[in-house]
Image (tube, grey):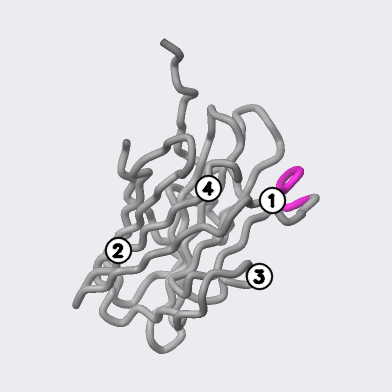
């Protein structure tokens, strides 16, 4: 699977973070497994462990996100995944419109691992929470560093301000599996 180097929005540059890469590690009938790698993470603020539970507002501090839509459709799904193990999932009928909680059959699994200058964040989302393939998707991240510095990372950005819901941010493509 392809690895994407995310781009910090120029209006909100990071202080110490030097790069963010993300990728799909695997997809099978049970789980979609994702990874984000943050380089220059020495001053990264991670929310404290809180246990697996659906929680709104995770994007207000360090949070990793996946946006998924069916090509040609208006609606899309958003998954917010926190190093605290908290998570959220939403359905949108259109661009920032018609929001509702997305049904998730079991809690996603969030696993942060931190070294002296790197953070690896793995997440597994139950396959039953995802739309059928094919997808257009976007990896994003909100990173908070010490001092309240926040940077907004995506595969692509609209020019004016960070907006992960903008279709420009959904630059990944995943085809449906071919049947034998």
- Residue of label 2: 120
In the image, taking residue 135 as reference, residue 122 lies left or right, namely: left
Q: In which quarter of the image is residue 59?
A: bottom right
Tell me which label, 3 or 4, sits earlier in the chain: 3
SS class, disc 2: strand
Q: Which of 177 and 144 is in front in this view?
A: 177
Dot 4 or dot 2: first in sequence order is: 2
Quarter where residue 114 is shown: bottom left
On residue 126, which mark appears? 4
Question: Crowding near pointer 4: few (<14 within 10 Å), some, many (20+)?
Answer: many
Earlier sequence position, callout 1 versus callout 3: 3
- Which of pointers 1 and 4 lies earlier in the amino acid sequence? 1
Which disc, if any, is residue 103? 1
Is 128 drawn above or below residue 7 in the view shown?
above
Q: Image height check: is 168 above or below 10?
A: above
Which secondary structure, mark 4? strand
* Residue found at the far right of this picture: 98
Query: Which residue is pictured at 54% across the width and 51% down the height?
Result: 158
Query: Is 43 a magenta residue?
Result: no
- State the extent of the magenta-drawn residues as a range: 91-97
Residue beneath disc 3: 56
x and y percentages locating residue 155 in the rendered image: 43, 48
């Amino acid at each position: 699977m392809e690895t994407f180097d995310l781009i910090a929005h120029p209006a909100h540059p990071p202080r110490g973070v030097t790069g963010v890469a993300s990728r799909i590690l695997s997809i099978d009938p049970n789980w979609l497994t994702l990874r984000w790698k943050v380089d220059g993470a020495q001053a990264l603020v991670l929310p404290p462990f809180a246990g697996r539970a659906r929680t709104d507002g995770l994007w207000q501090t360090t949070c990793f996100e996946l946006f998924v839509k069916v090509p040609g459709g208006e609606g899309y799904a958003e998954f917010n995944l926190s190093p605290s193990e908290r998570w959220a999932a939403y359905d949108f009928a259109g661009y920032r419109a018609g929001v509702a909680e997305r049904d998730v059959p079991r809690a996603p699994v969030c696993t942060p691992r931190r070294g002296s200058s790197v953070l690896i964040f793995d997440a597994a989302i139950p396959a039953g929470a995802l739309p059928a393939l094919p997808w257009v998707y976007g990896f994003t991240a909100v990173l908070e560093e010490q001092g309240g510095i926040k940077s907004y990372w995506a595969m692509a950005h609209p020019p004016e301000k960070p907006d992960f819901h903008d279709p420009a941010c959904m630059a990944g493509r995943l085809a449906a599996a071919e049947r034998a």
